[in-house]
Image: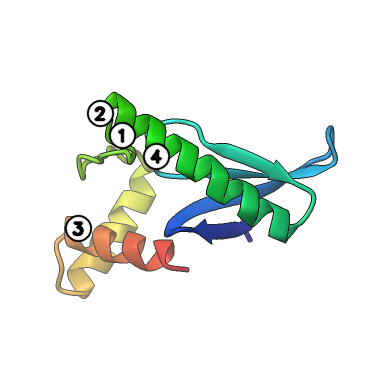
């Protein structure tokens, strides 16, 4: 299980940094780094709000898009046996391999 926190609609992954004995939040999907540290969940939320606000203000000042833009394309390399198996699964479900993969990935990302 990945520990996550949503701050002002933006997800952050939360990890523990034993070197400094603090929790670290790292926003995902941003066009740059905006991490934050605290000893507890309340502090993480507070520090995360500050970090995100500073990041968004800097993007606005620079005229930069704060969120990553994705093309909708990526290459996936899998073993031939797995390729055959997923192709069969797509055919059985009445979908193209692409649509089957989109559906499976979307379902997995929502968990």
Quadrant hosting residue 19: top right
User: How dense is the environment of label 4, judged by Cα within 10 Å: few (below 14), some, or many (20 and up)?
Assistant: some
Where's residue 30, x and y in %?
Answer: 40, 39
- 46 in relation to 70, above or below: below
* Few, some or many residues within 10 Å of mark 2 (<14, 14–19, 20+): few
Query: In the depicted view, which residue is nearer to us: 3 or 22?
Result: 22
The correct choice, above or below, for 84 with respect to 76 in the image is below
Query: Marks 4/3: CA distance?
Result: 38 Å
User: Which of 88 and 23 lies nearest the eye of the viewer?
Assistant: 23
- Report which residue position mark 3 lands on: 97
For the N terminus, give its image quadrant. Answer: bottom right
- Gap in angstroms between the C-alphas marked 1 and 3: 40 Å
Q: Is residue 92 left or right of residue 81?
A: left
- Whether residue 76 sits left or right of residue 108 in the image: it is left
Choose mark 4 or mark 3, whichever is in front.
4
Give me the disc on residue 63.
2
Pointer 1 with pointer 4, Cβ within 8 A: yes
The tag on residue 60 is 1
SS state under label 1 = helix
Instruction: Tell me the CA gap for discs 2 and 4.
Output: 10 Å
Determine which residue is flagged by label 4.
56
Between discs 2 and 4, the one toward the N terminus = 4
């Amino acid at each position: 299980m990945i520990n996550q926190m949503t701050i002002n609609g933006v997800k952050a992954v939360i990890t523990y940094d034993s070197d400094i004995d603090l929790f670290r939040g790292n926003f995902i999907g941003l066009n740059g780094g905006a991490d934050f540290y605290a000893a507890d969940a309340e502090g993480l939320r507070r520090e995360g709000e500050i970090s995100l606000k500073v990041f968004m203000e800097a993007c606005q000042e620079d005229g930069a898009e704060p969120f990553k833009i994705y093309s909708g394309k990526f290459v996936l390399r899998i073993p031939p046996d797995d390729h055959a198996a997923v192709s069969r699964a797509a055919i059985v479900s009445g979908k193209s391999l692409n649509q089957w993969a989109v559906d499976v990935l979307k379902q997995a990302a929502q968990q």
